[in-house]
Image (tube, helix red, strand yellow):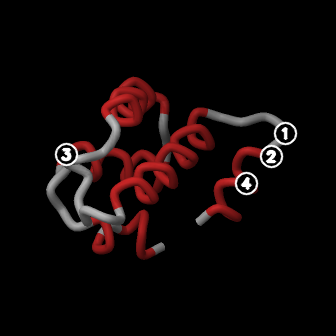
Amino acid sequence: MLAINDAIENLPDPSPDAVAACLLVEINYETLRSATTQEAPSGIERALRILLPQLTGNIAADVADLLDNPDAPITERMAWIG
């Protein structure tokens, strides 16, 4: 997870999708202990809600799923499974 996050952060011109990807990595890392995003840091959730209209493709779908279904187990989400 950290290697993926580092690769995203080192992109030469980060897009909203790249920022959202970093936030998804962070929220996955933070919520592993509880297995759901209900205890996710509220700042990450707010940032993802703001970014969502600008997101595309799989990142948009993963963020929408996370925001629409906060009680779904994190390990069953496509963002986690890959």
Looking at the image, is mark 4 or mark 1 nearer the viewer?
4
Residue 54, above or below 73: above
- Residue indicated by mark 2: 10
Judging by the rendered image, the residue that carries numbered circle 4 is 6
The amino acid type of the residue labelled 4 equals: Asp
Cβ atoms at labels 2 and 4 below 8 Å apart:
yes
Mark 3 crowdedness (10 Å alpha carbons): few <14, some 14-19, many ≥20: few
Judged from the image, the secondary structure of the residue bearing numbered disc 3 is: helix
Does 57 sit left or right of 35 as displayed? right
Q: Alpha carbon of mark 2 to alpha carbon of mark 4: how far?
A: 6 Å
Could you tell me how far apart the alpha carbons at marks 4 and 1 are, in whole angstroms? 12 Å
Residue 77 % position (x, y): 32, 67
- Tell me which label, 2 or 3, sits earlier in the chain: 2
The kind of secondary structure element at disc 2 is loop
Residue type, mark 2 in image: Asn
- Residue 24 location (% of width, % of height): 46, 50
| Cα separation between marks 4 and 3 | 27 Å
* Marks 4 and 3, the one that precedes in the sequence: 4
- Name the amino acid, label 3: Asp
Find disc 3 in the rendering and name its residue.
Answer: 68
